[in-house]
Image (tube, rainbow, N blue to C red):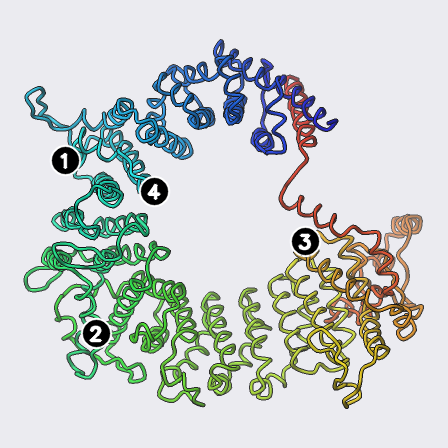
């Protein structure tokens, strides 16, 4: 209760300050934070306080009297606060008594003031809050508040204002129509929305004649565009309703909606405006289908009968063909696909259009791909030359089978419009159109079904084949390795002519490869669904051999090869054969080596990612790749890149690749074991400047430690470096990887002592004694003591304490606390184990912990040699300076400050030291008993909670109010100081 009183007291002060005549602020964030806290459930008592609604009343009174008297941010705050108050139904009565909402609506409706967007947004939110109640809807109807919402819904306002206003307007319209069944108000709102359209249309009736209309008038088009956007929004919102609405029937009956919108075509040749018209018409067609057919229980037609809807759709598509506007044609197909998906399960899987049963989505996919299909000439030629190859024929037959008659008619109509009678392109099938097709298809990746995704993937593959074939012809070359035959000049003469510009464009090639990669990744397409993809690696191998290929295409080709290797190698690879003969992968080795030496770092990095993928699957899935990597001499090249490449990302990728290779025996024995991997990895973990490189280096060393033996001379340096990574590294990912290394060491030690799956069996094989032994309770306790003694010696528990005291990373803290809790839980099972550990692994005096949670400057100690002089104090320095001034001997200066300037040879050698001091770990050697004693002083759950609040930027309401008061005080002081 006392806390609540403190909050209310401070809030009252702040509210009073807001209404001062000279109030101004430069910090707008506090308003948002204050509103966030006021909206929280735990602070509901604040909104119920009487002074809050009284302050709102006082504020609106002052605003009505003199709008400029109150700061605009305060007005916006007041409106948002009013909307929060209106969420409480009992508070509505109080707002009504004080006439607050009435005055706010009148204030917003006064057109003589230019309100800021935040004020408009606050007013919209207030109307949204009161529209939840029938009393509020009646109030909005009396004041005709929808006029304000329609005004805010046009494009002259900010995005947030338009979006909120449309949502509230639709809510009011829907409730008036279908909840309150107020037909008069519904028609009035619809008439108000459609008025800009009706006022500017061609009319010729008995009562009115208007034959002069403005064509492409910018101001008029801008005004009507906003109306069309609003209508499209309302119509599309009705598609997600579960119940039938009468809105669509009212639009059809009272406004002849379809004909009215079609008439707008006479007003413009602007393609942007035409797209808006057709967006509205498509939205109307789907809304009509939904509410007059699918949700209409009185409909006499069968549910799958879609002839009327289908013909309307085909008419819209045909319009853009007659206008020879390919881009708008593709955009309309994309829009219809999105709208069809909004119907969800309410629409039948198959529909009937003029006695033909088809899948509507397949028709849309055909229109999406149509401009791309025009360029497929090479696949047709190959099919003609090799009678055995009928893959392309099968794909064409598939397209014919999934298309209905009207779809095919439109396809041929588009061909006749975009090409002359002899098959020559008239310049309408452009690279830009092809790019739009691909981007449009990728925009639908989240709504595409698997069947359509496979169809698109096959089409993109054939476009890629066309690009490869054209490159062969252009360069007059032939390479049997890639199964690509040169067609000579006859290719360019094939029907249709002129599409070479599309497939030869680098942007199209890039889009095609991005499209293939996206679809294959998302839908997990394999050669079982699309047999064409067996030849994907062949095509990409040729693309990668092209030295003139730009970096973007090269990177995408490498990523696609990686995906092809992971998803669909040729069927002979599935047999796990021991060589790659007869496959395009034979040519991949030289290509990888060449691309590893590319001048662009992005290409080198992607090549390493491909190599990492090959190394990963070569371990078990496809062992033939192991010999492939050795024959191409790739492992030593990867190591050199990890050591010497100038780009940090490339070095990190190289270490990631090595981490996959070191676990493979054949690769380790044939090259990697002869390299100074461990020494260099320890150097990188200690000296490397880039975080991601250090992180990958830790992982690589962990893999080596797990699968290979590390020489005993590195043992102290290894654990010292690990401790430095945890205690001294500033990057949380490096810390996490180093802690994971420590956890693996725990598992390894326990495994060596005979633990299996987290428990000690009664009989086990001891790696130390090299024989099968029976484990008693005493022997188990002794084994555990050995493990913890080793960990204690190398400073594991000291590192844990340091992280618990000083660590700022939430991820690291959670990892450590989870491990500590598990260890504590296991420890409680064994009594007297601490004494056993101290008995078996006592810490010598010179090994005792020398840290009381040291600072960063103490983490890298530089041992001082016995003969090295200590730095001079200030008195000695002054004497030397006086001597220099008296003698003017410059050599004295050099001698005196030699120690401080660190120019002697011994210190230069220290700076060049590759590895950390091998006994660095000793400063963290904390006895386990001391570790648990320190642990009792730390509330682990509270520590996590505290950090969680920091990272989520949560702050106490009282402290926020104090901060606001302090900020206002500072602003006042600054204003006073500015006067002087």
Q: Mark 2 to mark 3: distance in Å?
A: 56 Å
| Circle 1 Cα neighbour tier, 10 Å, few/some/many (<14 / 14–19 / ≥20) | few
| Circle 2 Cα neighbour tier, 10 Å, few/some/many (<14 / 14–19 / ≥20) | some
Please tell me which of labels 3 and 1 falls first in the chain: 1
Q: Which mark is residue 392?
A: 2
Q: Mark 4 to mark 1: distance in Å?
A: 28 Å
Q: Mark 3 to mark 4: distance in Å?
A: 47 Å
Foreground tag (1 vs 2) = 1
Please tell me which of labels 3 and 4 falls first in the chain: 4
Q: Which mark is residue 717?
A: none
Q: Is residue 882 left or right of residue 78?
A: right
Q: Secondary structure at mark 1?
A: helix
Q: Mark 2 to mark 4: distance in Å?
A: 44 Å
- Residue on which the image places disc 4: 242
- Residue on which the image places disc 3: 809
Please tell me which of labels 2 and 3 falls first in the chain: 2
Q: Quadrant of the N terminus?
A: top right
Please, is residue 212 above or below residue 753 in the view?
A: above
Q: Secondary structure at mark 3?
A: loop
- Residue on which the image places disc 1: 259
Residue 657 occupies quadrant: bottom right
Please tell me which of labels 4 and 1 falls first in the chain: 4
Residue 453: percent from left, percent from top: 31, 63
Q: Is residue 4 left or right of residue 299?
A: right
């Amino acid at each position: 209760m006392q806390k609540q009183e403190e909050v209310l007291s401070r809030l009252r002060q702040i509210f009073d300050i807001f209404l001062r005549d000279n109030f101004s602020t430069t910090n707008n964030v506090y308003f948002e934070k204050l509103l966030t806290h006021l909206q929280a459930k735990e602070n509901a008592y604040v909104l119920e306080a009487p002074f809050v609604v009284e302050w709102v009343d006082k504020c609106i009174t002052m605003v009505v009297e003199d709008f400029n008297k109150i700061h605009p941010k305060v007005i916006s705050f007041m409106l948002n606060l009013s909307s929060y108050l209106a969420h409480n139904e009992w508070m509505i009565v109080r707002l009504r008594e004080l006439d607050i909402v009435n005055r706010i609506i009148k204030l917003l409706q006064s057109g003589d003031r230019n309100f800021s967007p935040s004020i408009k947004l606050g007013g919209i939110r207030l109307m949204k809050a009161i529209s939840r109640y029938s009393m509020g809807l009646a109030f909005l109807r009396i004041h005709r508040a929808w006029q304000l919402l329609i005004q805010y819904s046009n494009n002259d306002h900010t995005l947030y204002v338009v979006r909120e206003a449309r949502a509230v307007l639709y809510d009011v319209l829907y409730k008036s129509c279908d909840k309150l069944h107020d037909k008069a108000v519904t028609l009035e709102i619809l008439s108000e929305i459609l008025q800009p359209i009706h006022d500017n249309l061609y009319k010729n009736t008995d009562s009115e004649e208007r034959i002069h209309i403005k064509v492409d008038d910018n101001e008029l088009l801008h005004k009507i565009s906003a109306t069309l956007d609003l209508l499209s929004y309302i119509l599309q919102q009705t598609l997600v309703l579960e119940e039938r609405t009468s809105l669509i029937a009212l639009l059809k009956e009272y406004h002849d909606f379809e004909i009215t919108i079609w008439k707008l075509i006479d007003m413009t040749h602007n393609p942007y405006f035409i797209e808006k018209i057709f967006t509205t018409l498509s939205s109307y067609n789907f809304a009509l289908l939904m509410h007059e057919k699918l949700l209409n229980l009185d409909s006499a037609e069968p549910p799958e009968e879609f002839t009327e809807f289908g013909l309307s759709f085909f008419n819209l598509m045909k319009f853009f063909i007659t206008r020879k506007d390919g881009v708008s044609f593709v955009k309309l197909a994309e829009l219809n696909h999105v709208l069809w998906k909004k119907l969800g399960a309410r629409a039948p899987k198959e529909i009937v259009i003029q006695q033909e049963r088809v899948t509507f989505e397949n028709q849309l996919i055909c229109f999406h791909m149509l401009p791309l299909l025009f360029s497929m000439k090479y696949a047709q030629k190959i099919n003609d030359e090799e009678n055995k190859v009928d893959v392309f024929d099968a794909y064409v037959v598939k397209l014919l089978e999934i298309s209905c008659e009207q779809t095919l008619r439109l396809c041929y109509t588009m061909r006749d419009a975009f090409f002359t009678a002899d098959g020559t392109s008239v310049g309408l099938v452009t690279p830009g159109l092809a790019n739009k097709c691909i981007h449009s298809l990728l925009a639908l990746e989240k709504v595409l079904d698997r069947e359509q995704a496979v169809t698109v993937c096959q089409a993109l593959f054939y476009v890629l084949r066309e690009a490869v074939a054209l490159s062969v012809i252009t360069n007059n070359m032939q390479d049997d390795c890639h199964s690509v035959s040169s067609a000579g000049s006859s290719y360019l003469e094939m029907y249709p002519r002129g599409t070479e510009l599309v497939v030869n464009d680098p942007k199209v090639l890039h889009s095609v490869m991005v499209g293939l990669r996206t679809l294959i990744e998302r839908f997990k397409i394999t050669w079982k669904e699309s047999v064409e993809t067996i030849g994907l690696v062949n095509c990409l191998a040729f693309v990668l051999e092209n030295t003139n290929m730009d970096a973007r295409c090269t990177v995408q080709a490498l990523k696609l090869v990686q995906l092809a290797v992971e998803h669909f190698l040729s069927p002979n690879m599935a047999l796990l054969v021991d060589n790659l003969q007869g496959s395009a992968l034979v040519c991949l080795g030289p290509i990888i080596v060449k691309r590893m030496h590319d001048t662009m770092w992005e290409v080198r990095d992607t090549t390493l990612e491909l190599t990492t993928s090959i190394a990963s699957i070569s371990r078990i899935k496809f062992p033939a790749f192991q010999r492939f990597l050795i024959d191409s001499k790739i492992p030593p090249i990867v190591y050199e890149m990890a050591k010497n490449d100038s780009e940090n990302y490339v070095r990190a990728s190289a270490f990631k690749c090595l981490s996959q290779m070191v676990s493979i025996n054949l690769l380790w024995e044939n090259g990697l074991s002869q390299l100074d991997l461990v020494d260099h990895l320890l150097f990188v973990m200690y000296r490397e400047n880039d975080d991601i490189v250090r992180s990958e280096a830790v992982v690589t060393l962990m893999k080596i430690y797990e699968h290979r033996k590390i020489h005993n001379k590195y043992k102290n340096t290894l654990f010292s470096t690990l401790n430095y990574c945890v205690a001294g590294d500033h990057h949380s990912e490096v810390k996490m990887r180093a802690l994971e290394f420590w956890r693996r060491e725990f598992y390894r030690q326990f495994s060596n002592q005979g633990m299996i799956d987290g428990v000690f069996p009664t009989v086990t094989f001891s790696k130390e004694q090299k024989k099968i032994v029976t484990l008693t309770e005493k022997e188990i306790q002794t084994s555990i003591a050995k493990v913890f003694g080793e960990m204690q010696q190398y400073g594991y528990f000291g590192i844990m304490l340091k992280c618990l005291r000083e660590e700022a990373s939430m991820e690291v803290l959670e990892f450590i606390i989870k491990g500590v809790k598990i260890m504590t839980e296991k420890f409680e099972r064994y009594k007297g184990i601490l004494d056993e550990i101290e008995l078996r692994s006592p810490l010598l005096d010179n090994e005792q912990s020398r840290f009381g949670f040291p600072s960063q400057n103490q983490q890298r100690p530089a041992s001082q040699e016995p003969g090295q002089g200590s730095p001079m104090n200030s008195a000695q320095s002054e004497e030397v300076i006086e001597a220099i001034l008296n003698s003017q001997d410059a050599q004295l200066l050099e001698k005196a400050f030699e120690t401080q300037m660190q120019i002697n040879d011994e210190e230069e050698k220290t700076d060049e030291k590759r590895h950390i001091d091998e006994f660095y770990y000793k400063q963290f050697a904390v006895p386990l008993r001391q570790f648990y004693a320190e642990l009792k002083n730390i509330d682990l759950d509270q520590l996590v909670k505290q950090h969680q609040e920091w990272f989520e930027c949560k702050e106490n309401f009282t402290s926020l109010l104090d901060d606001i008061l302090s900020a206002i005080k500072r602003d006042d002081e600054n204003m006073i100081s500015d006067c002087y």
